[in-house]
């Protein structure tokens, strides 16, 4: 009888141990899921952009303007913000904060198709994504630029002879001085649309140009990632990368607005996304000027976009509340 009781007790102890092990495994799984990072910020995360420096070199005669009237070799953020005073049709959009948007680089009526991403919790602690197509307006600061999540503005270039332009190695996207480096700059993008060209004195005609039908995308800092970006690449997209010295990762940008939720880890399988192949991709510290675009003599209107690409692996929740600085310098080569 004693042996039977001992056997029963032994069985009960084994059951308890198995149950305890199962509880520990489930708890560990929940903990690991909670530690995971996801591409695309949650809707309340953002990166703060306090300053934008736009520098355009005047090599062999190139000049730049915010209104095609007043010319210099450099334009400032303040000039861009106030361009509407002499350029009535301006739609220079400069919010103080940037949030998760995405684009496949498509252009409609001279504007790049940009889509704001809204995330919501889905099954198994994953996130779902829907998007809203954004319009562009004349505004500056978050109070005026309500619900605007990317930067867009026009500049005008004046040359006396046809010119080949480059983005110089002085261009970069970096954390602001004194700000914590959270790696958000690794998800930054800069885009360009050539809207057309007119004669050297046709200022009014230049302002009305809106003939761009394609975009040029620059992806800076492609060779560096944060620890959480490396994790997001592996866990969400099945991509292997490293903290530094990495190859450029492929990604798909949003090509249309969609209301039906798509799981974030399934976006590469969705028809709402298209492969993006930036014309310019640079490392964190590149030294060679990057061929950009050729322009004719006279005035060329250029629309510039600056945004945080939601489909970039570094656009994850640990990178929120970053402070960034965009520096863009263009030069003319013979």
Image: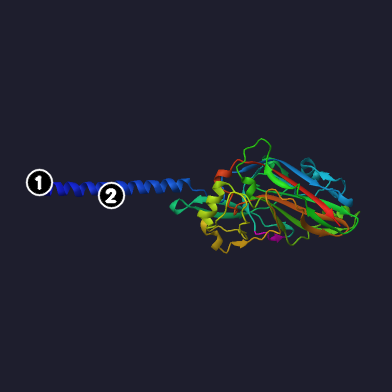
Q: Looking at the image, which is closer to me, 205 or 321?
A: 321
The image shows residue 107, relative to residue 32, as above or below, that is below
Which secondary structure lies at badge 1? helix
Residue 230 location, x and y as percent? 55, 51
Q: Which mark is residue 18?
A: 2
Q: Is residue 274 magenta-colored?
A: no
The image quadrant that residue 292 belongs to is bottom right
The stretch of residues the image draws in magenta is: 104-108
Residue 67 location, x and y as percent? 83, 48
Quadrant, the C terminus: bottom right
Residue 304 location, x and y as percent? 74, 52
The image shows residue 323, relative to residue 315, as above or below, that is above
* 10 Å crowding of disc 2: few (<14), some (14-19), many (20+): few
Cα separation between marks 2 and 1: 24 Å
* Helix, strand or loop: magenta stretch: loop
Which secondary structure lies at badge 2? helix
Decide if residue 263 is on the left or right side of residue 332: left
Q: Which mark is residue 2?
A: 1
The image quadrant that residue 252 belongs to is bottom right
Q: Name the residue located 66 percent from the left edge and 55 percent from the top edge.
A: 114
Decide if residue 8 is on the left or right side of residue 259: left
Decide if residue 199 is on the left or right side of residue 90: right
Q: Looking at the image, which is closer to me, 82 or 280?
A: 280
Q: Name the residue located 54 percent from the left edge and 47 percent from the top edge.
A: 228
Q: Which mark is residue 268?
A: none
Does the image show residue 284? yes
| Dot 2 or dot 1, earlier in sequence | 1
Tell which residue pokes out farthest to the left in this image: 1
* 10 Å crowding of disc 1: few (<14), some (14-19), many (20+): few
């Amino acid at each position: 009888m004693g042996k039977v009781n001992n056997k029963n007790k032994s069985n009960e102890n084994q059951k308890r141990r198995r149950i305890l092990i199962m509880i520990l495994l489930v708890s560990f799984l929940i903990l690991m899921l909670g530690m995971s990072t996801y591409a695309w910020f949650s809707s309340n995360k953002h990166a703060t952009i306090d300053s934008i420096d736009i520098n355009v070199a005047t090599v062999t005669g190139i000049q730049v303007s915010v209104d095609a009237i007043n010319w210099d070799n450099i334009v400032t953020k303040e000039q861009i913000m106030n361009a509407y005073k002499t350029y009535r049709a301006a739609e220079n959009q400069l919010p103080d904060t940037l949030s998760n948007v995405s684009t496949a680089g498509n252009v409609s009526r001279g504007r790049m198709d940009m889509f704001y991403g809204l995330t919501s919790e889905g099954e198994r602690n994953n996130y779902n994504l829907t998007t809203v197509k954004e319009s562009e307006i004349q505004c500056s600061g978050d109070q005026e630029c309500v619900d605007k999540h990317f930067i867009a503005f026009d500049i005008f270039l004046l040359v006396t002879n046809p010119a080949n332009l480059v983005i110089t190695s002085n261009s970069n996207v970096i954390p602001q001085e004194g700000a914590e480096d959270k790696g958000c700059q690794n998800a930054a993008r800069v885009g360009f649309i050539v809207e057309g060209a007119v004669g050297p004195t046709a200022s009014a005609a230049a302002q009305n140009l809106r003939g761009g039908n394609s975009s040029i995308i620059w992806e800076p800092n492609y060779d560096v990632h944060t620890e959480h970006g490396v994790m997001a690449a592996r866990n969400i997209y099945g991509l292997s990368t490293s903290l530094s010295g990495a190859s450029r990762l492929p990604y798909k940008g949003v090509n249309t607005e969609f209301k039906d939720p798509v799981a974030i880890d399934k976006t590469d399988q969705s028809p709402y996304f298209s492969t993006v192949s930036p014309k310019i991709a640079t490392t964190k510290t590149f030294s060679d000027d990057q061929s950009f675009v050729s322009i004719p003599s006279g005035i060329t209107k250029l629309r510039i976009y600056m945004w945080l690409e939601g489909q970039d692996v570094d656009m994850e929740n640990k990178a929120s509340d970053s402070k960034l600085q965009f520096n863009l310098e263009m030069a003319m080569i013979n």
